[in-house]
Image (cartoon, rainbow, N blue to C red):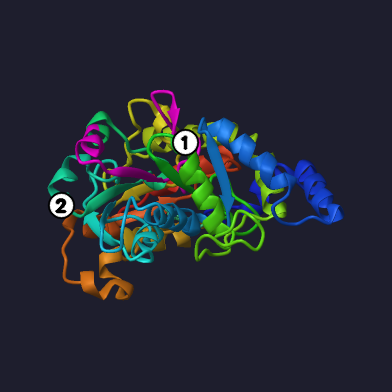
């Protein structure tokens, strides 16, 4: 059986270092807002190249907190619109609506699965205050047009960088391209904790301080509350683990690129549409390797019968979810096609060459007729 993602193996790569750091936290008697979080935040900001990094409880909170801080700072107000890709994971959209902001969905490009930047301008209204770009599947989305558009309409560019830590565009890391970025360290992400964890990066000190306060009960001085905040802190145990694994993220992303390259070169079955490797390979960290085929469910069944575990990212588009009844009548044909046809193949830093070859051979032997 080839697992979709063998998390035990992924974490055992760093067993000694992780166990030592965990034991250290356990014995220290200090579990929140301590040195481990400080060290990880410093290393994360150094890695991303941003002036600030703030550890929080999870990726959804990271995005929620950025938008909430913009509201507290008077940059945005309830009812304002935020542009977001229509095929993203639901969390991107929840972060917007949870703050009383309005998600305005824009279709992706069928070739990159990322927001089609040429379609953004048509979605801008007098109420638009930001664009939440999502580097989906690990492929970075950013270009000059997007930057100019944001300047022209005075929009904040917020990155959902849950899936693309380590990706870079012209020497700038994802997470340092826009005004602020949210990261998820959910165990299955490229940089995964042993539970829930997340972070925010930005270069604006006022924004950073506001986020820090909101995430800590709206307070940056004990028992003095400036905002009606929430409790969203990264704990010391997760920070210690993440700090170890951050040291290996480039190496692990390189291994993902090698696997992606083999899949794209060696899967030759004409029934399969392969993802395209970007012109600069550094723009993709292959959180997921997503193929498309009209007979997706049949292929998934066939692969499962042949011992290959796959997943679907994602089976139902956000605008068709019961949670967003107000959007159920909208139509986003590209997203709907993507959601019907995509299938994610196993990819991870611990997959062996033999396993990759097995996946390739079994897919090439698939006959969907
Ligand atoms: C995982 C993910 C999130 C949410 O992160 P959590 O840590 O699970 O809250 C947000 N956006 C995208 C695109 C994600 O993949």
Element carrying mark 2: loop
Q: Which residues are magenta?
A: 148-173
**In 3D space, how far apart are the residues under numbered discs 2 and 1 (Cα atoms)?**
27 Å
Work out which residue is located at the far left of the displayed protein and give it. 122
Instruction: Check disc 1 and report its element: helix, strand or loop.
Output: loop
Say whether residue 224 is magenta: no
Quadrant showing the C terminus: bottom left
Q: Which mark is residue 171?
A: none
State the residue position of label 2: 125
Residue tagged 1: 203
Q: Give the percent coordinates (x, y) of residue 319.
A: 26, 66
- Residue 61 appears in the rendering: yes
> Upstream in the sequence, badge 2 or badge 1?
2
Determine if residue 294 is in view. no
Residue at image location 35% in from the left, 33% down from the top: 277
**Residue 94 position in % (x across, y down):** 38, 63
Q: Quadrant of residue 58?
A: bottom right
Q: Is residue 68 left or right of residue 153?
A: right
Task: Say left or right for 240 vs 251.
Answer: right
Name the outermost residue toward the right.
Answer: 27
Q: Residue at x 68, y 47 (%)?
A: 37
Could you classify mark 2 by the number of other residues whose Cα lies within 10 Å: few (under 14), some (14-19), or many (20 or more)? few
Can you say which quadrant of the picture contains the N terminus? Answer: bottom right
> As rendered, which of 6 and 263 lies closer to the eye?
6
What residue do we see at 52% from left, 63% from top? 229
């Amino acid at each position: 059986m080839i697992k979709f993602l063998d998390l035990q193996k992924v974490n055992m790569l760093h067993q000694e270092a992780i166990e030592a750091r965990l034991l250290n936290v356990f014995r220290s008697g200090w579990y929140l807002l301590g040195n481990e979080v400080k060290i990880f935040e410093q290393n994360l900001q150094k890695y991303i190249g941003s002036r600030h990094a703030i550890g929080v409880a999870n990726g959804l909170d990271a995005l929620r907190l950025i938008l909430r801080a913009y509201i507290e700072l008077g940059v945005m107000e309830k009812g304002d619109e935020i542009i977001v890709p229509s095929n993203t994971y639901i969390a991107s959209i929840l972060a917007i609506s949870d703050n009383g902001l309005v998600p305005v969905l824009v279709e992706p490009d069928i070739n990159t699965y990322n927001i089609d930047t040429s379609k953004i301008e048509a979605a801008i209204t007098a109420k638009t205050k930001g664009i939440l770009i999502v580097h989906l599947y690990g492929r970075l989305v950013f270009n000059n047009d997007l930057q100019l558009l944001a300047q022209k309409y005075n929009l904040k560019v917020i990155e959902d960088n849950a899936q693309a830590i380590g990706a870079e565009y012209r020497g700038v890391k994802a997470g340092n391209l826009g005004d602020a970025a949210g990261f998820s360290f959910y165990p299955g992400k490229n940089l995964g904790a042993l539970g829930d964890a997340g972070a925010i990066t930005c270069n604006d000190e006022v924004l950073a301080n506001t986020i820090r306060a909101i995430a800590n009960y709206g307070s940056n001085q004990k028992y003095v509350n400036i905002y009606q905040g929430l409790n969203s802190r990264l704990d010391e145990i997760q920070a210690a683990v993440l700090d170890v694994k951050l040291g290996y993220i480039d190496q692990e992303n390189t291994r993902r690129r090698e696997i992606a390259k083999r899949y794209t070169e060696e899967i030759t079955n004409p029934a399969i549409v392969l993802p395209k490797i970007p012109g600069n390979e550094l723009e993709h960290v292959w959180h997921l390797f997503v193929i498309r085929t009209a007979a997706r469910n049949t292929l998934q069944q066939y692969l499962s019968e042949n011992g290959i575990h796959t997943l679907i990212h994602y089976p139902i588009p956000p605008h068709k979810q019961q949670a967003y009844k107000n959007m159920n009548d909208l139509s986003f044909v590209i997203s709907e096609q993507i959601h019907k046809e995509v299938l994610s193949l196993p990819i991870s830093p611990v997959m062996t060459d033999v396993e990759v070859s097995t996946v390739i051979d079994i897919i090439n032997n698939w006959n969907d007729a």
